[in-house]
Amino acid sequence: SISGSDLFFKCENFQKAGAFKIRGAANAVLSLSNEEKKHGVCTHSSGNFAQALALSAKLCGIKAFIVMPKTAPEVKIKAVKGYGAEIILCEPTLASREETSEEIVKIKGATFIHPYNDYRVIAGHSSLVMEMLQQVKGTLDFIVSPVGGGGLISGISLAVHYLSPKTIVIGAEPEAANDAFQSLKTGIIQPSLNPKTIADGLLTSLGDKTFPIINELVNEIITVSEKEITEAMKIIWERMKIIVEPSSAVTLAVIIKTKEKFRNMKTGVVLSGGNVDWGRVPFLT
C-alpha cells in the first residue's frame, strides 16, 4: 500500500453534477417552505455549486437564478443552462457577484443559498459521513477532507462529532492556498489572498459559519505542494482508474506526505469531485 494504511475512498466524483456539492444544494432546496419554493432559489457560483443548485431546483420543480462571472468557462455556463437554470452574468469580482445576487433576491423574491456558508448546505454535506460509517465495518480512525470555503469539512466534522466521536478529522489544503491552515493556527479567519493553485475548487476563504465549526472540531489541517497534488492525482487516475479533479487529490497527497500518522489505521479519504478542466490537467500539459 502507498500509505501503510487501510484507505476507504468516498467517491463524490460519481455524484450527480460530478461533486459532493449536490448534497448541500439538495438539502437546502428540500428545506424550503412551500411559499419560498414558489419564488425559487438564487446563488452566485462559477463552478460546482452552480450546477448542483440548478439540478436540485430542477428536480424539485422550482426556479433557479444563478449569478456567474462573465469569465466563467463556457462549459460550466452550458452545464448550468442544461439543468434549466436562468443565468445572470456579472463582473468577475466578489462585490459584483454579491450585488447582483441581492438584486435578484429583491426583484424575484428568491431565497439566497450561499455555496458553503449556509447551515442547510453544511447539514447536507454531513450525509457523506453517515454513508461512510454504514459502508465501512467498524470505526474509522481518520477522515481526511479537502478544505476550500469549509462547507464540506464543517458537515463532516459535525457528523463525526455526533456519530463517531473517536474519529479524527483532518483537513487537506494546498500550500499555495493555505488560508484555512493559517486561520486554524491563529484562531481568526485569514482571508485567501490571491491564491494560485491547480486545486481550483479550494480557492475560497472560510465563512463566518464554517470557521467556528472547523476551529472547534477539526483536529488539524495539513498542507501539500502543487507537485504533491499532481502526483496524487496521477496515482488515482492510474491505479484506481477514476477521474478526479486536483481539489480531490489533496486528500491522498496529505496521506502520502504524512504516512507515519496513518500507518495501520483505517482512514476515510474524501474524493470531492471529478469536474476536470481538460485544458488544465497538470500531467497532460
Image (tube, rainbow, N blue to C red):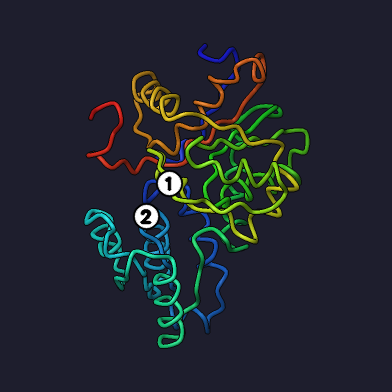
User: Please, what is the three-letter code of the amino acid marked with disc 2?
Assistant: Gly
Q: Which residue is mark 2?
A: 47
User: Please, what is the three-letter code of the amino acid marked with disc 1?
Assistant: Gly
Q: Residue at x 60, y 45 (%)?
A: 180
Q: Residue at x 42, y 42 (%)?
A: 273
In the rendered view, would you say 3 is above or below 108? Answer: above
> Seen in the image, is 126 located left or right of residue 196?
right
> Seen in the image, is 225 located left or right of residue 216?
left
> Seen in the image, is 112 located left or right of residue 200?
right
Where does the image place residue 184, in percent across and percent down from the top left? 68, 44
Q: Which residue extends farthest front?
A: 193
* Residue 219, image quadrant: top right
Where does the image place residue 78, in percent across and percent down from the top left? 23, 59
Mark 2 vs mark 1, CA separation in Å = 8 Å
Check if mark 2's residue and mark 1's residue have beta carbons within 8 Å.
Answer: yes
Callout 2 environment at 10 Å: few (<14), some (14 to 19), or many (20+)?
many
Of residues 118 and 84, the one nearer the viewer is 118
Give the SS element for disc 2. Answer: loop
Callout 1 environment at 10 Å: few (<14), some (14 to 19), or many (20+)?
many
Q: Which residue is mark 1?
A: 201
* Residue 207, image quadrant: bottom right
